[in-house]
Amino acid sequence: MIVKNEEKVLKRCLESIKGIADEIIIADTGSTDRTKKIAAEFTDAVYDYNWVNDFSKARNFAASKASGEWILAIDADEYVDREEFSEFKKTLLINPPVADILAVQIVNFVGTNGAETVLNYHERMYRNDGELSYFRSIHELIKSSRGNEKRALIDLNVYHSGYLKEVVSEKNKSDRNLKLLINKKNREPIDYYFLGNEYSQLGMLEKAIESYKKGYQQKEDMHIDWVKKLLVRLVSCLHALHRDQEALEINEGCIEFYFNLVDFRYLKGKILFDQRKSTEAIKVFNEILHSKDNLVADSSIDYLGYLPHRYLGELYEKQNELQLAVHHYSKALVLNDTDDYVWTKLIGLLGKHSREDEFLQFIENKCLKRHNMSLVRLIKILVAVPIKKVQKLSKNFNQDIRLSVVEREALQLKYSLLNGQYEELTKELSACQLNKIISTLSIGIFSIVDYILLTLVSNNQILISNLNKFKFDVPIDNLINMLLGKQKKRLSVQEEELFFSLFKQAYVLNNSMLIELLKKKRQYLGKDKRLMLKELI
């Protein structure tokens, strides 16, 4: 391993391999946190390495300290399943592969809270024969000094949380990687793929598209793994910039060439979904589900089932085909019950069309008994459903001993807001210490959306002052200033999302003053969000 400032994730990684790996070797490239102290709890082989902007040199330094027959390279934000890893090691001993460079499957958790997964194979295991080593300063690869490597895929998963939104923003990986790639001499075709990825991560989509096109033009073979991935990302970037005709033209060619790959079929359905071409999108997603046994996923297994079911749920709901909508939302949650958005959609439908006793029975038997469903998570899902009677049902859990004192307080604040007790709430919150308010909001039951709406209703100067003191992961100054009438700038994507949430909750509260105020401000939204608001109204 090579590490730097990984105190938040290193222990999880090392606990997953401890006692199974014969030795653990760590090269630290300049940590200033508790990384080295944590590493020392698991191994004596912790070495200092002077970072020279070259990942291969650092990996080769760590490998030079290894004495085992095989080397597995793993990063601090990754981990393995202990049982699977132990079984893999037994198989390696009994039936060693002919190949000397082995690729594992990396399961990347992406998005907020890791609700979606992206897959890729990566060469991480190789024979410690003195002839195999890493090359390339970034996105390093393994080669032999003999030049006759034998490569193979192996049945081992490595789980990676490094691309969760909150982790990426914290570690600034893309800024670091981009500098290394730009400064790389003798650029190869694959480097343009990696460049495109970093530009895309930073939101520089035009530059990403330019890099992807250069990489594609210089490719040697359409069947090379990174070329498929490049085309998926190129289509996605074009769609993000609303260049859908170009995206669909490229995508159709990819569907024909990679006929058994689900990725491009899924992208077609997603583009049609976003274009509100419901009938065409339904056809594409249903075709995926009917053909999934004959299709393979390159980027994400979610394309084969979970995401088609999720989008079909929304499409059928819009067409008022409620039984089909419930069917597909339920199927999506069978495949991935970590997606709170799908839970809000399903619970919203059931809450709207079921008797209260039947609905509460569903909540108790089908939701709370799930392994991944805590009571706090369930309450947050309930209060996210844009239906007042569903949000109010969260009050049934107010005295539950599974809730902490601050969680009960947050739930009471939410209930007071739903009942229109604005004066009492304003008085209570204006008397609160800022730290206590922040602590309460961080739970997500009485949320920042609720706080902003209360501030707009009350126009209380203490609440306004507090709102300007809050620190957010993504700045929302333009939104706050626009709502308070101080400034009129175009909103960022994140601010548009928050504005849309404010609008939905204003309708839940049925507060005409808030609704009219927000209607007047919708001109500062992009076209897509204005269309979504029009559908809501």
Image (spheres, rainbow, N blue to C red):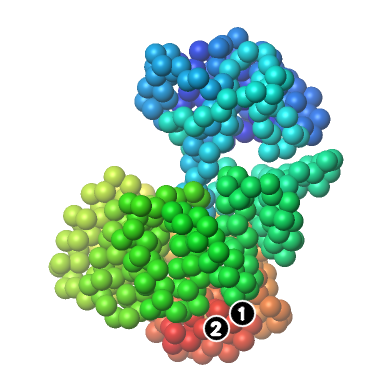
Drawn side of residue 76 relative to residue 188, left or right? left
Is residue 18 visible in the rendered structure shown here? no
Q: Amino acid at mark 1?
A: Gly
| Callout 2: SS | helix
Indicate which disc residue 526 carries.
Answer: 1
Instruction: Point out residue 239 in the picture as x, y percentages from the top left corner.
Output: 59, 69
Q: Is residue 81 above or below residue 300?
A: above
Disc 2 + disc 1, Cβ < 8 Å: yes
Residue that mark 2 sits on:
530
Locate the N terminus and report the quarter of the image it occupies: top right
Kindly report the distance in space between the C-alpha atoms of the residues bearing marks 2 and 1.
6 Å
* Vertical placement of residue 164 versus 59, above or below: below
Give left or right: position of 51 versus 513.
Answer: right
Q: Which image quadrant: the C terminus?
A: bottom left
- Packing grade of label 2 (10 A; few <14, some 14-19, many >=20) is some
Position of residue 468 relative to residue 504, above or below, is above
Q: Which quarter of the picture shows residue 483?
A: bottom right
Residue visible at 49% across and 17% down?
21
